[in-house]
Amino acid sequence: MPLWRVFIFASVALNVAALPLLLHQYIVNQPHHPGVVSPDQQRHACAPQPGTSGAAARAPSTGKPSVTSDSVINLDHGDPTMFEAFWRETGDAAELVIPGWQTMSYFSDVGNVCWFMEPLFDQQVRRLHRTVGNAAVDGYHVLVGTGSTQLFMAALYALSPADADQPTSVVSTAPYYSSYPAVTDFLRSGLFRWAGDANSFVGDSYIELVCSPNNPDGAIRDAVLSSGAGKAVHDLAYYWPQYTPITRRADHDIMLFTVSKSTGHAGTRIGWALVKDREVARRMTKVRGLNTIGVSKDSQLRAAKVLGAVSDGYDVGGGGASRHRLFDFGRRKMVERWRMLREAAAASGIFSLPEETSGRCNFANETAANNPAFAWLRCDREDVEDCAGFLRGHKILTRSGNQFGADPRYVRVSMLDRDDAYDIFISRLASLK
Amino acid sequence: MPLWRVFIFASVALNVAALPLLLHQYIVNQPHHPGVVSPDQQRHACAPQPGTSGAAARAPSTGKPSVTSDSVINLDHGDPTMFEAFWRETGDAAELVIPGWQTMSYFSDVGNVCWFMEPLFDQQVRRLHRTVGNAAVDGYHVLVGTGSTQLFMAALYALSPADADQPTSVVSTAPYYSSYPAVTDFLRSGLFRWAGDANSFVGDSYIELVCSPNNPDGAIRDAVLSSGAGKAVHDLAYYWPQYTPITRRADHDIMLFTVSKSTGHAGTRIGWALVKDREVARRMTKVRGLNTIGVSKDSQLRAAKVLGAVSDGYDVGGGGASRHRLFDFGRRKMVERWRMLREAAAASGIFSLPEETSGRCNFANETAANNPAFAWLRCDREDVEDCAGFLRGHKILTRSGNQFGADPRYVRVSMLDRDDAYDIFISRLASLK
């Protein structure tokens, strides 16, 4: 064998050997959510890249690499790539074309409180909520944000009195979404401060975050605190028919939504808030103006296109109902995945899951089960106190319960990854004893 | 005349009468920059919109409404719509097509410190800097942000010691960009705090913001402070050949850029940082992760396309140089507009402008003048102490010098608006005595 062949062989072999290690390191060290990148990870990953070309760089990204039966399976984040299969089927229904000269201005709608919001986006948000019946829109302001996380921070700003001596306490019932404490506290704001579990909070002045269905455990929730001086922010990211029965038209003061979980377009980073009060809407707009001087118009237009395609699927009255129905696809997948998961947990014998609940879904006009976007999995083996560590040992990456203010015997598992990764997860889980 | 005709006539007349008033109210009350929307403005503008359809809402936005010789001319913001004319000429060279299923994941590049950055964007940023020669890229991390404002906040976070007793002082030489104090202080962070003019700062530990060419006055600047514990952030948003001669390849520790000012795509909200230090890059990435969980991939792909089209215009070596050359267009426009402005100021007799400076431009390979994106205009009339107020009385909206830590006899005027608005501004200015 000539020397160059030996070289190439050795090089390829080394790369293959190094890949799982790198991937493992990358994924394991992500403590909170996509936003929190650990130092270990950086050390491997962040060498400056002097090259400007290379075939790999010439195409848009595809997300996490594909997996095989030996791969580390990363279900730590709620990366909603399950929905790709649906959108591939829709052809050009949700395709966006942006000419080079379009939407160059900072301004979208100089007459609106959200002067940077595309009118098309506003229109399609209202249309979809009317189609699904999950939230009231009449009398509400629609505000667009770079993901619902930015809107959550904007709501904290808007609801915290500017003249208070002390930062306003921010609370949520445990287990609570792991981003809430991190986003609240990372800039050490003098306006608001994380104060933990709502159930143990004492005081009159607070902001309660109510996530329903709840991240991480899928529970249907109401606010637990009530006082004249307290405020609630309702995070309804998962209140869509693929995850839960739509039992009522929500009409809270501030409601947050995101395309990440409704349609699966996480990379588009578009969220929206429905806000009743004009002054609150104004203050929330100020934050997004200062923080990022508005929100990407390209993504607003894409979100409008995608939301419009979803509504088109159910536009029976308009005669234009398409055969592509996102919520039907989503519910079918979620029912199937939850069935697989419950079977795998039973086969294994060492895991337990929240009991299945159901309700009358006004959208589907039938009784439907709650099929949460995350599984809140408990490891029942006496000798396992750290379920995330135990699963990591079996190359399954999840988020530990202690990041949600809960017992580390619990983990949160994303149910929204691609089929290949989900199937490997299921068979691996079933084999654990 | 039948009654219905009278009605229609009265209705149209009322609308026409109300329009300038509304527009004036909207624009006048915007004190800082697009992000700060005043209460007065809201009162007019933010009635919830119950309607979901209507022809007006079916197209992407076009920015501010077009103007006539009687209009209020808003040159308060640096809205870079001047560049639309260039991009309209380029046909589909910068057109972006995004299929419905593309870039749905949170992740773009799991092996990079910026796990949410599209490799295409990284590649085109490096290519353009190499083409222009305005900044070093080898050995630098490219970080993408939702506008350079978010990156500026990320830099403050990254450079502020987490364990300090006191917030780090943030300073800049006056006149400084009006957003710097606002963005630094709006969340009352315990990590950093605005401390005003760098020239009057006393202490060792600080973050100095160096904007060059400077917003608002176009001056070429270097850091004025130096100490072992101090850090500098270089905002090079305007260091492009249409505005200033490229005299050297900048190689500072942290350099900020944005497509808003380089190509005119403000609505895309994409900025980038070139960062030398790995740990700083890591901490800056953490902020953008927490704040918005990454950056719109649609806009990253659009920015990549646009930056690529700019480089293509000058790709002589590759044989593919197109006839569309952004910097040639931009310089031609800026030279012409500055000539018009100086003539108008001379015709009026009551205004003065910074003296013209020039230098050897390595990019154009000739001597070129500094043609700033903003004019720093001084009203010399003895009885005018508030130049912005004086101009507002003549339906020209500018930003007062006092928002930049300077004398209110000065105003900042955007030089980047569309031709029609700019021409009206010039003729109106020339007539003021």
Image (cartoon, coloured by chain):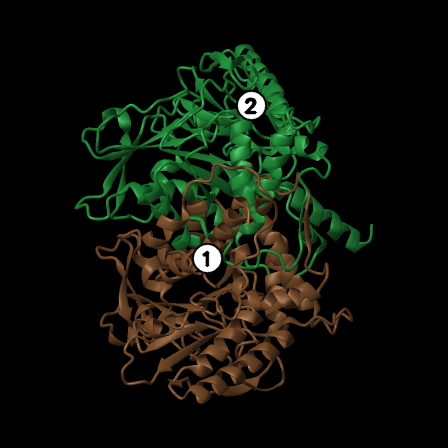
Chain colours: A green, B brown
Name the kind of residue labelled 1 in the image. Answer: Leu
Q: Nearer the viewer, residue B142 or A369?
A: A369
Q: x%, y% of residue A272? A: 47, 39
Look at mark 1 in the image and give the residue it sits on. B19
CB atoms of marks 2 and 1 within 8 Å: no
Helix, strand or loop status at disc 2 = loop
Q: Nearer the viewer, residue B297 or B91?
A: B91
Instruction: Between label 2 and label 1, give the one nearer the viewer.
Output: 1
Quadrant in the rendering for residue B253:
bottom left
Query: Residue shown at 42%/46% (left/top)?
Result: B291
Q: CA distance from mark 2 to mark 1?
A: 45 Å
Quadrant in the rendering for residue A235:
top left
Of all residues shown, which one is farthest toward the front? B1
Helix, strand or loop status at disc 1 = helix
Left or right, residue B379 beside residue A135? left
Label 2, residues with CA under 10 Å away: few <14, some 14-19, many ≥20: many
Chain to which mark 1 belongs: B
From the viewer's perspective, is residue A433 above or below residue A419? above
Label 1, residues with CA under 10 Å away: few <14, some 14-19, many ≥20: few
Q: x%, y% of residue B361? A: 57, 83
Quadrant in the rendering for residue A219:
top left
Q: Quadrant of the C terminus of chain B?
A: bottom left
Look at mark 2 in the image and give the residue it sits on. A242
Chain to which mark 2 belongs: A
Query: Residue shown at 45%/89% (left/top)?
Result: B346
From the viewer's perspective, is residue A120 above or below residue B374? above
Q: Can residue B139 be seen?
A: yes
Check if mark 2 and mark 1 are on a common chain. Answer: no
Q: x%, y% of residue A373? A: 51, 25
Name the kind of residue labelled 2 in the image. Answer: Gln
